Image (cartoon, rainbow, N blue to C red):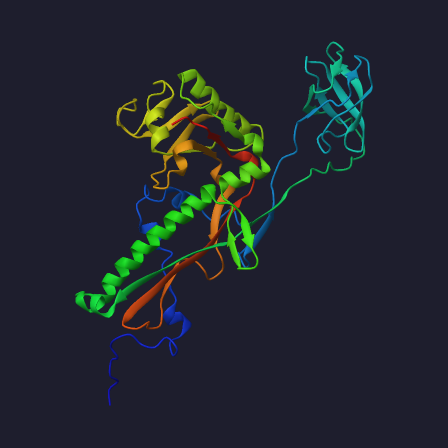
Amino acid sequence: MADKSIYGQQSTFSASDSALHIGIEDLITKYPDWQFPILKRWNSNVFKGQVKSHKYEWTERDLRPVTAKVVDLTVAADATSFVVDTPGVFNVDDVLRKPNGEQVIVTAVAGGVNLTVEAWTGTPETMEAGDTVTRVGVASPQGKDADNMVIVGTEDLYNYTQIFEDVVELSGTQRNSLIHGDENSSELIERKHKELAEMLQTALLVGTRNKDAANKRTTLGGLKYFIDTYAPNNAINFGGSWATDATVIGKFEDAVEAIASHNGGKPTIYMGYKAMRKFRLLDDDLIRTNRSDKARGVGVVDTYLSQLGELDIVLLRERTGVMNDLIFFVDEENVGYKAHRNRAWFTKELADLGDSYRWQVLGEYTAKIATPKVSAYLYNLGL
């Protein structure tokens, strides 16, 4: 006897996990680029392994700094030693430049901060506490044995995963009134997924890393949280008003400089509607729109000409208003998001609850901000 087809909702108790769990991660790629630009631009390449726990850990990637400040109240012009405020910056044979141009060579380092030096070039100069000394070269003598490696302190960073979940529910009458029942439920699932994806994108920017152990609830820290926590100097006060072009350009270049000082890549600028409306009026020579004539006009601004060259601009069309007072400068090679293993966006049909049909939509994600020091943001825009 031929098998009979079974119609209607089946019990979930006898269904396999694979039948219940339907991946919908690829919906993200089907949405227009303008709808979820961060979810489209960020990826998981920055992650080195799978996310297997609610906590993902990594060590910050950073280059050895090139500057430190003098601690001594006064350093005489002919002094052969002085103390700096940061260990792990200078090493034997480093060529250091004093504030006014004299260069000296480091001959010994004790405790990471106590430097012994000898004069090299330029006019001998005195220094005071707070003066900046800069490493401008290395001059190792011929035939010398190798020195010990300079140990640079790194931050051990981590982030939590966050569960984004909601339910689609139809009464029996609603479902059976639809001509294509499952097809229409799919449309509802897609709409619910869009709502959750919108919340994920917002969390990637302004989420706060936190854990409630008692209730087993965690939230991920977004880009702003990591800058505030590990690179607070990269949060730049805009000053509360869009006064003149020179003022606006100065603040933008402050953000670019903060990134460049840590050898970050060319950042991408994220801004919201209100900031873009002001930004479109900036000096003609500094912005380009998507108009075919490559001139300033009513088109969406594509690039900003900074000291690092042309920077891409991404308009975030978001409903929460979080971008009304923020402009982000993001080194996109150092940011990414990833799903917990086997927890990328999925839907599954739930058991009956009376005369209703229910589908759960869920995804569990975290963000990795590999090096917070190579991103920045402006705040207090005055919009």
Q: Let me know if residue 159 appears in the view.
A: yes
Foreground of the two, 243 or 367: 243
Q: Is residue 112 above or below residue 129?
A: below
In the displayed structure, does residue 108 sit left or right of residue 57? right
Q: Is residue 357 above or below residue 71?
A: below
> x, y percentage for residue 369?
53, 43
The number of discs equals: 0
Residue that appears at 40% across and 26% down: 304
Point out the residue furthest to the top here: 123
The N terminus sits in image quarter: bottom left
The C terminus sits in image quarter: top left
Residue that appears at 54% across and 33% down: 264
Determine the image quadrant of residue 62: top right
Determine the image quadrant of residue 227: top right
Foreground of the two, 149 or 196: 196
Residue that appears at 33% across and 43% down: 33
Foreground of the two, 263 or 111: 111
In the displayed structure, does residue 365 sit left or right of residue 115? left
Q: Is residue 380 above or below residue 353?
A: above
Foreground of the two, 52 or 177: 177
In the displayed structure, does residue 27 sit left or right of residue 107? left
Residue that appears at 27% across and 58% down: 188
Q: Let me know if residue 48 appears in the view.
A: no
> x, y percentage for residue 326?
43, 33
> x, y percentage for residue 36?
36, 44
> x, y percentage for residue 334?
52, 41
Point out the residue furthest to the bottom here: 1
